[in-house]
Image (spheres, helix red, strand yellow):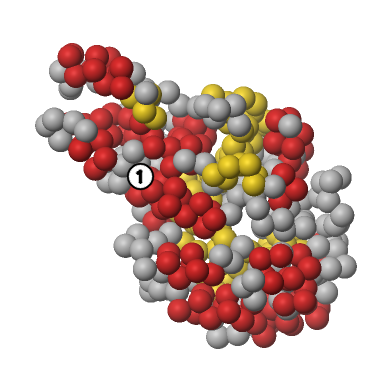
Amino acid sequence: MQFFYDRERQEIAAALEPSFRATQLYKSVYQRWITDFQQMTDLPKPLRMSLAQDWDLGLPEIARRFDSVDGTRRYLIKLQDGEMAEAVYIPEENRNTICISSQVGCALACTFCLTGQLGLIRNLTAGEIVTQAMVAQRDNLSWEQRDSFNIVMMGMGEPLHNYDNVMKALRILHDENGMNMSMSRITLSTAGMLPAIERLADEPIIPNLAISLTGATNDKRNELMPINRKYPIEKLLEAVRRFPLKHRQRVTFEYVLLKGVTDSPEDAHNLVRLLKGMRAKVNLIPLNEAEELQYSRPSDVAVQRFQQILVDNHISAFVRKNRGNDISAACGQLKKKWAG
């Protein structure tokens, strides 16, 4: 039986006669939230019976849900082979955010990231990526609010290390007869997979780009993010400068603040020099501490000092509020603790 959510509408159309049935199916599943073919009364009964034999419409099971006092909800979602994907729902005043994973584990071994300690277990399929967003959407939003969310691909894994499945998932999310998500509502975060960034720049649909930087010199980044030894900062920023941006669009640089490692005024001035003249904004992320990590969160004073140096040098800088600290907020922490 085929997993429906792994297929683009055109792929389903190629398997159906007449092909317009694929559009009806997509609208039923993604826009009307139907997960039973027998409820699709706009389809002939024999077709509904045939589809039920060939296609699996079931959404993955929520293995565990952790609710934070601040409204954040973190999920371990059980996949068909028993593996777990992590997703997070973050309620916000103007628009909610759903953070989803692209892999089980990660191969990049960034020293401040718990997912890196898991190693790469496997890539997620397009459908396994898409359904994380669907599960979080339907568990948190009413029918009237169903479109009031953004997606960020910042969960477990390096999205551009699973390029083909990630791009297929984005096309499914974007399909006007499916979830109909504008690319402006989707952000893809990468640690700096340089050839894949260049490939992404040529795609017909391109999400917002975020670069996980966390270190403003090669020496510092080599220590924290081994990928920098292959794709050093200067090469990465050359590719980012060439990346196509829409009017008033900026690239986001994510910078994790580690006490005594990346939070000094010198680090801030190095970051200023690095980003000078770029259409960029910086998300400063005070570390979500975990006992498995060797690093600590800087003081609020150090965080504010770092931010002020960037702002004084005309770089937009925002401090990301720590959310869900009481429910194992660090990426990979849930799987490590609860899924083995």
Q: Is residue 24 left or right of residue 265?
A: left
- The amino acid pointed to by label 1 is Ile
Q: Measured from the top left, where is residue 117 in percent x and y?
A: 75, 48
Residue count near mark 1 (Cα–Cα under 10 Å), binned few <14, some 14–19, many ≥20? many
Q: Work out whether residue 39 can be spotted.
A: no
Q: Measured from the top left, where is residue 259 in percent x and y?
A: 85, 63
Q: Residue at x 24, y 17 (%)?
A: 50
Query: Which quadrant would residue 192 be assigned to in this image?
Result: bottom right
- Above or below residue 292? Residue 315 is below
The quadrant of the image that shows the C terminus is top right
The quadrant of the image that shows the N terminus is top left
Q: Residue at x 59, y 26 (%)?
A: 82
Q: Which of 166 and 297 lies nearest the eye of the viewer?
A: 166
Q: Residue at x 65, y 53 (%)?
A: 107
The residue carrying mark 1 is 172
- Above or below residue 277? Residue 123 is above
Q: Work out whether residue 173 can be spotted.
A: yes
Q: Secondary structure at mark 1?
A: helix
Q: Measured from the top left, where is residue 142 in percent x and y?
A: 44, 30
Q: Which of 15 and 311 lies nearest the eye of the viewer?
A: 15
Q: Measured from the top left, where is residue 151 in percent x and y?
A: 49, 48
- Above or below residue 249? Residue 122 is above
Query: Which quadrant would residue 243 be assigned to in this image?
Result: bottom left
Q: Is residue 186 left or right of residue 7?
A: right
